Image (spheres, grey):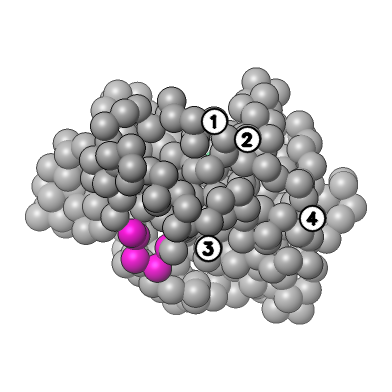
Amino acid sequence: MVERYIRFLGLEGTINLLRANEKPLTPTIRVNTLKISIQKFLNRFNKKGFVCEPIANIPYGFKILKEPYNLGSQHEYLQGYYYIQNLASMLPAIMLNPQFKDLVIDMCAAPGSKATQLAQLMQNKGTLILIDRNKNRIPALRVNINRMGILNSMILNYDSKNLKNLKIRAQKILLDAPCTGEGLIREDSSRKKSKEISDIKKMAKIQKRLLIAGLETLEPGGELLYSTCSIAPEENELVIHSTLQNHPNFSIIKMPYVMGISGLTNFDGIALRKDLINAQRLYPHIHDTIGFFMCKIKMLY
Ligand SMILES: C[S@@+](CC[C@H](N)C(=O)[O-])C[C@H]1O[C@@H](n2cnc3c(N)ncnc32)[C@H](O)[C@@H]1O
């Protein structure tokens, strides 16, 4: 793993990454403005002794600097006033930028961090189709949808590789793809050893099939946001580069704002699509987040 990191981060970058992976993350929450105003929420939370620091560019996102009680056992949590969500995970929904009237599909939705945020951004309007293949993860998704007061969604226990068979076209699609989770080492150190290069290759095949299914379900002008909590180029830029080779009517576009550093436009001596520069990578040592990747793809015609 370290050898692979050196290939795209260099020696110094890799050392910095490994060091940053050992530092605990500051907990972050997303206030659910469908249920409570930010000011009312802060008044309640401040009274309890929590210290909340606003996150730049995310008006409803807060770092919790002082946590006198467990975040997951507060009345406000059970009432759906907030979601405990790491900062990087708040970005894909913002970057996808769904509108009230859109038909939006979340292809890999459980347990619903990003799905409930999509609904929040859509102000509970439009249509949100939430799909997950794993039956065991559907109850958690349902609980979160109910807790957060989401009214514009339907849940499907379905394999998104077969999305085309549903015969629908979406304006916006989120593909928060299953991945090796290499970027989550900071949250779970067991991930340092749990994945092999063979796992990366296996995931890349699934990611490509899901990406093709997503692209073929967009309506002209529609947009798909691809994200993973992996920093492996094989699960990110290489998946997108090889898939788009057979889909010339798509382009990688800029996201509403820049939080990470640019995607790779070459890897291991292979030149990749130039528009991958519009993708964004987040790293623990640079952005103080988990390792994360995002890329926004638009159907041109
Ligand atoms: C990274 S997690 C999604 C996390 C979720 N987006 C969130 O923000 O809470 C990936 C999800 O993809 C689901 N998945 C894997 N393969 C799938 C497929 N072929 N079709 C639909 N869902 C799939 C997994 O069950 C898992 O819940």
Look at mark 2 in the image and give the residue it sits on.
147
Q: Callout 2: few (<14), some (14-19), or many (20+) C-alpha neighbours within 10 Å?
A: some
Q: Callout 3: few (<14), some (14-19), or many (20+) C-alpha neighbours within 10 Å?
A: some
Identify the mark nearer the N-term, 2 or 1.
Answer: 1
Q: Which residues are magenta?
A: 54-58
Q: Secondary structure at mark 4?
A: strand
Indicate the position of residue 272 as horizontal and vertical percent values. Answer: 44, 68
Q: Nearer the viewer, mark 3 or mark 1?
A: 1
The three-letter amino acid code for the residue at tag 4 is Thr
Identify the mark nearer the N-term, 4 or 3.
Answer: 3
Q: Nearer the viewer, mark 4 or mark 2?
A: 2
Q: Are marks 2 and 1 in contact (CB under 8 Å)?
A: yes
Look at mark 3 in the image and give the residue it sits on.
94
Report the Cα–Cα distance between label 4 and label 1: 25 Å
Q: Secondary structure at mark 3?
A: helix
The three-letter amino acid code for the residue at tag 3 is Ile
Report the Cα–Cα distance between label 2 and label 1: 7 Å
Q: In the image shown, does 66 or 20 lie closer to the viewer? A: 66
Q: Residue at x 28, y 39 (%)?
A: 49
Q: Residue at x 55, y 72 (%)?
A: 252
Report the Cα–Cα distance between label 3 and label 2: 21 Å
Look at mark 1 in the image and give the residue it sits on.
78
Q: Secondary structure at mark 1?
A: helix
Q: Residue at x 41, y 55 (%)?
A: 61
Q: Does 244 sit above or below residue 27?
A: below
Q: Residue at x 79, y 55 (%)?
A: 127
Report the Cα–Cα distance between label 3 and label 1: 24 Å
